[in-house]
Amino acid sequence: MLNALEIFTTVIVGLMVGVEFSVAFVINPILNGLPGDNGLRGRTHGARMLGALMPFWYIGSLVLSAVWAIAGRHHHGAGLVVIAAALLILSVIMSLLLLVPINNRTKTWTTENLPVDWKEQMNRWDRFHYVRVAVIIAAFTLLVTALT
């Protein structure tokens, strides 16, 4: 049973990393390159769509990692899983304190009500997101290493 939990947790976290990596390095650069307000429209739609999904994915990944850490506390790699869970906690805290406030503003924007500093806010979100992606990649790497 523990083996299934380990694999399931690693796959769920890995998929989350893939989504967040693609947002940072594929989707947002594509949207930024679109003419006119098309990129902004894409980002606001993405903020609404992913803003509804990702909290469950982040919390679910954290819960699965915590269950793995507790259930496997006497097994090889338990320390790595605890560190991975701590990094996932950090990613949730970063999300709540840094990214969600910007995201909540972004998802209400239209071309008619853009704040003057909207590009600066998008750049700030991107920078915070790059750091969060690095944190969850580290967590995923630790989980994969704990499997061996």
Image: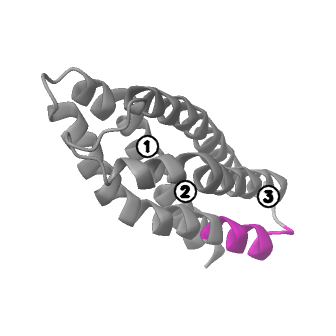
Q: Earlier in the sequence, mark 3 or mark 1?
A: 1
Circles 1 and 2 in contact, beta carbons < 8 Å: no
Q: Which mark is residue 82?
A: 3
Vertical order, 26 against 72 (above or below): above
Residue 83 falls within the magenta-colored stretch: no
Depth check, mark 2 against mark 3: the one in front is: 3
- Whole-percent x and y of residue 68? 69, 69
CA distance separating discs 3 and 1:
22 Å
| Residue picked out by circle 2 | 10
Vertical order, 80 against 55 (above or below): above
Mark 3, other Cα within 10 Å: few <14 / some 14–19 / many ≥20? many
- Whole-percent x and y of residue 79? 84, 54
| Residue picked out by circle 1 | 20
Q: Residue at x 20, y 39 (%)?
A: 111
Q: Which residues are magenta?
A: 64-74
Depth check, mark 3 against mark 1: the one in front is: 1
Q: Which mark is residue 56?
A: none
Q: Secondary structure at mark 2?
A: helix
